[in-house]
Amino acid sequence: MLPGLVYLYILVKGAFAGSYIKALRLKDKMELVKMATMPTRGEIILHNNNHYTIGEKIGQGNFGVVYDCIDSWGNNLVAKVLLPKKPYEEVKTGWQTEFQNLLTLRNPFITYFYDAFEFRDTFYIITEKCLDSLSGLIKIPDYDGLVWARPIARCLLQAINFMHSVGYVHKDVHLGNVFTSIVKDELVPNNNNAWTFKLGDLGISKLAGDINVFNTILAKWMLPPEYLNPDEFGIIDQRIDIYHTGLLLMQVLTGAVQDFSERDIVDGLPRKTAEQLPPPYNFAISKALRRHVDQRTRTALEFWNDLNQNS
C-alpha cells in the first residue's frame, strides 16, 4: 500500500474509532439521564386516561422515593418512583417484577395497587395512601397493645394466608411494612373512625420455590434461626413470614421495638420473651417463634386459631 494511502487509512480508521468511542460515551450519558428523571411537585402525569398530580415527597428507601399523589377522581394515593441505582434494564426488570407481584397479590388486606407505568424513562407504581405504619401507631399517647393486637393480627394473618395460598412469601414483615388504613365513608367523607390494617411493600416478595438462604436479604434483627444455621433449624420457606409476624405481634403488644442479636436468635431468646406475654398471646406467639422450622406454626390460619384459644 502506498504511504499516502496508508496515512489516509489510519486517519479514517482513527476517526471511526473516535466516533465509536464518543457514541459509547454518549450512550452511557443518555443511560444516566434515563435513570435520573424525578418528578416535581405539582407535575401532572397522564396515563390510562387518568391524571396523576404529584405532591410532596413523603419518604425514601432503598427502592426509591415516595410522593403524595392525587388522581382525577380525587383519590389520595402515593407514587412510588424507583431510584436509578442500577443500569436501566436492571431497574426495569425489578419494576416489572414488583408490578407482577402487585397484580397477583390483590387482596383487601394488602395495600391496593392502582397503576404502574414508565414515564420519561422512569418507573412509577401508584398505590393507595395509608395513614401510617405500625411503627408510628405504637408511639401514640396512651398506647395499649392489648387493644390493638387482635385486630392487627386478624388483618395481617389474612394477608399472609392469601400470599401463601398463591405461592408467594413476603420475607419482610415488620412494623414499618404494615399500615393503618382509613375505610372511606362515601356519605361522610371526613369520618375517620373506621380503620383496617394492610400489609405493604411487596418489593422483595418471592415465589415460595425461589427462596433460599443465599438469596435472602434481611435486617439483622429479623434473621430467623434457619437463616443463621440451616443445618440445625431447617430451610427457609413460607414460615419465615410466620416467624416475622410473631416478632411483630410481640412488639405490638409491648409497644417496644425488639432488637435481638444473632446469638439471641440462635439461643431462642425471641421465643422465651414471648412466653412472658399474657395468654393467649404467650402460647400463640412463642409457638410462631420456635427455632426449628418443623416445630413452628405451619400456617397463618393456624396462628389465628392459636390466638383464639381461651381468649
Image (cartoon, rainbow, N blue to C red):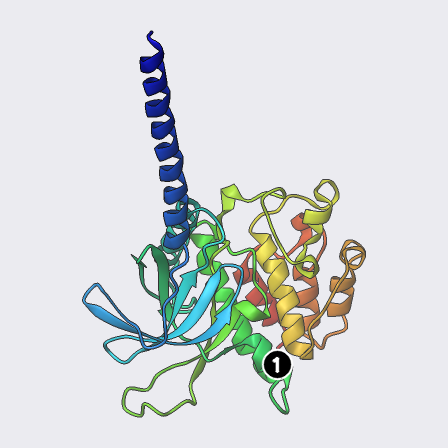
Q: Furthest residue to the top? A: 1
Query: Is residue 7 shown left or right of residue 72?
Result: right
Q: Residue 108 in the image: x percent, y percent?
A: 39, 69
Is any atom of residue 280 visible in this view?
Answer: no
Q: Secondary structure at mark 1?
A: loop
Q: Name the residue carrying label 1.
A: 138
Closer-to-camera residue (2/153): 2
If the image is split into quadrants, where does the N terminus sit?
top left
Q: Nearer the viewer, residue 260 or 243?
A: 260
State left or right for residue 239 relative to residue 94.
Answer: right
Q: Residue at x 33, y 8 (%)?
A: 2
Residue 251, relative to residue 122: is it above or below? below
Residue situated in front as seen by the camera: 13 or 155? 13
Is the C terminus in the top left, top right, bottom left or bottom right quadrant?
Answer: bottom right
For the image, the number of numbered tags is 1
Q: Is residue 311 left or right of residue 1?
A: right
Relative image position of residue 197 (x, y in whole percent): 48, 75
Which residue is painted at 70% across and 64% down in the image? 286
Residue type at mark 1: give it: Ile
User: Which of 257 and 291 lies nearest the eye of the viewer?
Assistant: 257
Position of residue 175 measured from the top left corner of the image (x, y, whole percent): 59, 70
Circle 1 residues within 10 Å: few <14, some 14–19, many ≥20: many
Q: Classify 28 as above or below 10.
A: below
Q: Is residue 111 visible?
A: yes
Looking at the image, which residue sits at the far left?
49
Q: Residue 239 in the image: state x and y as whole percent.
A: 59, 53
Residue placed at 73% from the left, 69% from the top? 274
Residue 10: quadrant of the picture: top left
